[in-house]
Image (spheres, grey):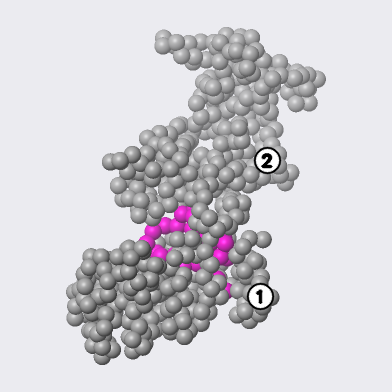
Amino acid sequence: MNFIEQIIEEDIQNRKNDAKVYTRFPPEPNGYLHIGHAKSICLNFGIAQKYGGKTNLRFDDTNPVKEDTEYVDSIKEDIKWLGFQWAEEHYASDYFDQLYQWAEQLICDGLAYVDDQTQEEISKGRGVPTAPGVESPYRNRSVEENLDLFRRMKAGEFPDGSRVLRAKIDMASPNMHFRDPIMYRILHADHHRTGSKWCIYPMYDFAHGQSDSIEGITHSICTLEFEVHRPLYDWFCEALKIHHPQQIEFARLNLNYTIMSKRKLLQLVKEHYVNGWDDPRMPTICGLRRRGYTPAAVRNFAETVGVAKRDNIIDVSLLEFCAREDLNKTAIRTMAVLDPVKLVIDNYPEDQVEMMDAVNNPEDETAGTRKVPFAKELWIERADFRENADKKFYRLSIDREVRLKYAYIIKCTHIVKDQNGDVTEIHCTYDPMTKSGMPDSNRKVKATIHWVPVKHAKAAEVRLFDRLFNVPAPDDCEEGKTFLDNLNPNSLEIKQAWLEEGLTYEKAVAIKHFQFERIGYFYCDPDSSTEKLVFNKTVSLKQ
């Protein structure tokens, strides 16, 4: 049990909020969700499910300049893909009328005022935490003047940035968020839902707690950076005398070799360092999905990371481990050769083709088997042969035996090279008595390698991904450099591979997740067509 669940169980025991548990997931629709949001989704929805409650999806759409319906749609898709369904769908913009009325109420109570200072003057007046700020010269305007100015702000009389509405709290507070925070700013911009109805928009700190209150949220679960905002969250609810949810903070998810800033992720997309928000190198949920991560793997990762009170950095290898654990149980096996060299079995009949039995998934008896054609000429991985092998290399070498997976034991006799000295053909003989079921089938050799028959192979494009950044902390840059200087120039490698001919387009699209035996887990990319299959490497096999 984590500390959030302990708080909730105590509330239930004390019959607080009639022992109900209502949570919410409140993203701003100004970008695509990433793995950090996935942790928050799993936490909010998971807690509500555990205690028989509900979770709302609420879009914090208070900044029309940065928000778009494209992001709204993507967020919904990501939540559903993770396996969750919200109870109610809301938008902060649903409450603009109510928020405006509450703002007028605070003006009438002498707790808010219109300030004509510039943003620079307001920031300077707030001072520093160790010394009191300076009160605005407009702080003591009358209620009547403030109401008049605020209504004229709403009516569109003033240009952007000319006036703001501020709460009147405490300019000497050590908490900078208490030093007369801005509640409304003027912004003449069309909103993706309300159009041109509004030209003033509430700030996050004024909209968030009240939106929670309207929806009857009991536990407002936020990441740790909102801890200093909590006193202001509480102050607005108490000043307005409305339902007061409890804000609880937990440590956000930080992964090494990754950035989580939406602004920086947007920069990567706009400046074409990646191929869109769903580029499989991105930490976005849609990027993870396209790379081949499963919802179960992401949920298990979020659960394994757990809920902490202090920020820490998680190794990305844990996410890869969770993907590997899930895919090992579910992915269909197939053989694929990514860096081919031809192997010729000299004593195998020229035109003979045998159909070998291959297991679809040894972890799942119900997955069944498939037939793989075997012939005289095969593709094998170039790395599975070494001309001058030492004792630690157990795979194929001259005068050495290996087993071909699902087939026979072979022995290398000689090789053919081109004018550059590169091996073009590996010649060998096979022992026909070593096939499964034959007398010598149990003869031991030190290695088994995979293969694909040359005349029965299907070409495919395979995309191999490395980490997007070269360093564990991409934001830690030398003076004069940015996170972009830490990009890995070799984060994407594209190869033409040879696959089993039975892996048709229809089968690839239907199954999606595959283990390329001895290589790793791969996902059928949406770019695939009947003319060309495309696979993304999700994660390697356990080393």
Q: Which residues are magenta?
A: 22-45
Tag 2 secondary structure: loop
Q: Which residue is mark 1?
A: 12
The amino acid at mark 2 is: Asn
Rendered position, 543 above or below 474: above
Q: At 57% across and 56% down in the image, what residue appears?
A: 308
Q: Nearer the viewer, mark 1 or mark 2?
A: 1
Residue occupying image coordinates x 46% and y 67%: 26
The answer to if 41 sits in the magenta stretch is yes
Give residue 82's position: percent from left, percent from top: 55, 58
* In-front residue for pair 444/208: 208
Q: Residue at x 36, y 77 (%)?
A: 169
Left or right: 105, with 237 as reference point: left
Residue 168 at what x, y percent from top left?
34, 79
**Residue underneath mark 2:** 361
Amino acid type, residue under disc 1 in the picture = Ile
Q: Which label is found at residue 167?
A: none
Q: Examine the rendering and report whether any part of residue 363 can be seen.
A: yes
Location of residue 484 with respect to 154 vertically, above or below: above
> Residue 341 location, x and y as percent?
51, 21
Q: Nearer the viewer, residue 428 or 146?
A: 146
Residue neighbourhood size for the residue with mark 2, other residues' Cα within 10 Å, grouped as few (<14), some (14–19), many (≥20): many
